[in-house]
Structures are given as C-alpha cells and as structure tokens.
Amino acid sequence: EADIYQTPRYLVIGTGKKITLECSQTMGHDKMYWYQQDPGMELHLIHYSYGVNSTEKGDLSSESTVSRIRTEHFPLTLESARPSHTSQYLCASSSRGWWTEAFFGQGTRLTVV
Amino acid sequence: AQKVTQAQTEISVVEKEDVTLDCVYETRDTTYYLFWYKQPPSGELVFLIRRNSFDEQNEISGRYSWNFQKSTSSFNFTITASQVVDSAVYFCALSEASDQGAQKLVFGQGTRLTINP
C-alpha cells in the first residue's frame, strides 16, 4: 500500500483565488511528480523533482508552480485560479531510477467556478 | 518523440468473459520500460506490471497476463475470467532513460473497462 497523501480530495473555488494542493509521502522517495488528468482521462506530467530544492517543468505547460523544501512534501500552487485549471491533479513519487514504478496519491479534483 | 496509444476508449463485457486491452507505443530509444496501471474509482493509480525493452517474455499473474511484442511495438493486457472488481480505467505508460533517474511517464489515453454482473 502506497504511503502518499493528497489534500484536499475535492476543492471548489472561485476564479482568481490562490490555492495550494498538498502532497506528502512517507516512503523517503527522492523523486516526486505532479500529473494533470483532464476529463477525457489523459494524464500529463506538469512538474517533477529530483530531490530537495529541485523542481522541473514537465511535458505539459502549466501555470502552476511547485516547491520542494522537504523530501516528503511537494505542494503545487496556483496563484490565480481560472476555470481552465479545472482538472484532477495526481501526485506521485518513486525511488531509485526511471525504471521503477511510481506510487500515486488519490488525487485532488479541482473545480474553478 | 514518445507516444502511447490505447485505441479502445471503453470496453464493456459480462463477468467471466476474457478481455484484452491494447497498447501500442512509439519511441526512438532502444532502452525503455513499459507499465500498466489501474485507476479504480477511488482515484489513485495502482501499479500492475513493468517490462523493460530487452525482455519480451510474456508474464502471467493470476488472471492477468501481458503480451509484449517489440516487432509490433505492442504491450497488450489480458484479463481472463473477468470479475466485477476489475472494473476500472487502465493505463499503459512508457518511461525512457533519463539523467538523474526521474521517471517521466508518457501515458496512453486510458481504457475504461466495465464488467457487468
């Protein structure tokens, strides 16, 4: 069973608000990731981190930002939410290298009205 | 650039039927890994299997089996004697070798599988 947690599970928020989606893992994994899942189910990598103080942009451009101050914590922030940000956001982590499986949280379903 | 295609958007079968989920991938790398994940209604992706590009052996795990064929760039997933609990969205994904070991998965579009009692 994966030990990676996301809060909140569901969030409905008004346009223009600043939001932070939380992601924590207790497995001591160096690498962490954020994926965006659109309503059509496709998943796209938007951010990842090799370790503390490392953040990189993924393949899908995103207006969100991330930080990695502690190994176990990888929050995602939207400074000004818009309806186009409505999506499911999934956090994941992995150990060792690119060949290992990733462990996923249950996701945050964000709706911006 | 890498790409994963799952042509079947939705599949619906009756319990106990066998069902195969197709996955076709594109990559220029010779070293890569392929994965299958299951996404139940609770939302998280659950790892099912990985296969590296040098290992074309098929794998069986209980009712699940996987067929990897490099010649056709396919990595298909078969559920034998399906059960209602198998209902979920299934994703095929590709990971290529990267510096510093970050795993940047490229996912297929997913196949929503519904098993009817």
Image (cartoon, rainbow, N blue to C red):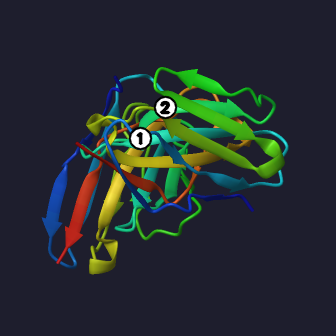
Image spot of residue B23 (x, y percent): 61, 51
Task: Return the residue nearer the eye: A66 or A60.
Answer: A60
Q: Is residue B25 above or below residue A7?
A: below
| Helix, strand or loop for disc 2 | strand
Where the C terminus of chain B falls, by quadrant? top left
Please name the residue that numbered disc 1 is placed on: B38
Query: Which disc is residue B48 wearing?
Result: 2
Image spot of residue B77 (x, y percent): 56, 40
Q: Earlier in the sequence, mark 1 or mark 2?
A: 1
Quarter assignment of residue B12: bottom left
Using a 10 Å C-alpha cutoff, classify the residue at mark 2 as few (fewer than 14 neighbours), some (14 to 19) or many (20 or more): some
Look at 34% across and 46% down and name the residue there.
B88
Task: Return the residue nearer the eye: A78 or A45.
Answer: A45
Compared across the picture, whether A36 is left or right of B116 comes to right
Residues behind callouts 1 and 2 on a single chain: yes
Look at 38% across and 66% down and name the residue there.
A38
Task: Return the residue nearer the eye: A25 or B39.
Answer: B39
Compared across the picture, whether A47 is left or right of A97 comes to left
Chain letter, disc 1 residue: B
Query: Which disc is residue A79 wearing?
Result: none
Tell me which amino acid carries mark 2: Leu
Look at 71% across and 58% down and name the residue there.
B2
Compared across the picture, whether B72 is left or right of B63 comes to right
Quarter assignment of residue A111: bottom left
Tell me which amino acid carries mark 1: Lys
Look at 48% across and 45% down and name the residue there.
A33
Image spot of residue B83 (x, y percent): 31, 34
Do residues under tags 1 and 2 come within 8 Å of each other at their CB atoms? yes
Image spot of residue B46 (x, y percent): 40, 35
